[in-house]
Image: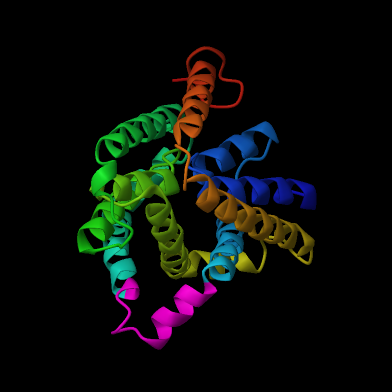
Amino acid sequence: MVAWQAAVLGILQGLAEFLPISSSGHLLIGERLMGLDSTGALLEILLHVGTLAAVLIVFWDDFWSMLRHPVRDPRLRLLILATIPAVAAALLFDDAIERLFTGWFLGVSFLITAALLFIGEAVQARRRARESNTVHNGHALAMGLMQAFAILPGVSRSGSTIIGGISAGLTRESAARFSFQMSAVAIVGSVVFKLKDLLDAGGAAFGSNWMVPLAGVLAAMVTGYVAIRWMLRLLRSNTMRPFAWYVLAVGILVLCDQLFFGKFFPKL
């Protein structure tokens, strides 16, 4: 892998982490289109660290308030509550999830994301008069359960959690804001969870050429920052249906390759 390829993957990670289109799915597609076997555990985590930096920059005041007043400010407790289902799913189904990351499940996962987005928008349209701007335990748990489901490659974490929040009664913007903050806890947790693998891979992954991961991290951070700001503005008055149509189209294209051609993904 060279620096420009890492930068492309960083752009995909930064955009797709916060747009409801699946970062893991788009990274797999990016790897296959560029003829790469795998991103590797170290670069994958570093790309997530880039998006973590974007989240911390955008929500610095919120996180600082949570850390200064962990008891008085309920958001830290809510973020921890929302993270528990994903941690449980990762511990219970780690091996099965790793097998899905070979790519065979990808087309189906994109279609699942599209269905979730369409269903969520339909639910939101019906309960608009009862929407809340404040996250409570029920909202956090619903979003946490959807985050656990989104461990599947190709299922959008941001899309699933936002839809979970909307279905539980949050406005789109409030659900997106909490979803993006959830990603910070999820990334820190994944780093801790994969710490041994990272230490084993760290020394030999890139040799002395640290321009490769640096290009990826910077690209993920910048595009992640732009994506967060844009999505928060977009969801104040717009729906996520365009994203649903997009991932539906991507899912159909991936399935066609899997069923008939096998050019980029193993044939089913």
Please provide the residue range marked out in magenta.
60-76
Q: Nearer the viewer, residue 220 or 121?
A: 121
Determine whether, in the image, residue 82 is placed left or right of residue 197.
left
Q: Nearer the viewer, residue 2 or 123?
A: 123
The quadrant where residue 48 appears: bottom right
Q: Nearer the viewer, residue 64 or 247?
A: 64
The quadrant where residue 41 appears: bottom right
73 is within the stretch colored magenta: yes
Query: Farthest residue toward the front?
Result: 129
Magenta-colored segment: predominant secondary structure: helix
**Image coordinates for residue 38, horizontal then vertical, percent:** 60, 45
Which residue is pictured at 44% across the width and 63% down the height? 181
**Image coordinates for residue 213, horizontal then vertical, percent:** 70, 60
Determine whether, in the image, residue 12 is placed left or right of residue 146.
right
Which residue is pictured at 74% across the width and 46% down the height? 5
Q: Taking 118 as reference, is 10 above or below it?
A: below
Q: Taking 37 as reference, is 115 above or below it?
A: above
Query: Farthest residue toward the left?
Result: 138
- The colouring scheme, among rainbow, by chain, secondary structure or one colour, is rainbow
90 is within the stretch colored magenta: no
Q: Nearer the viewer, residue 76 or 263?
A: 76
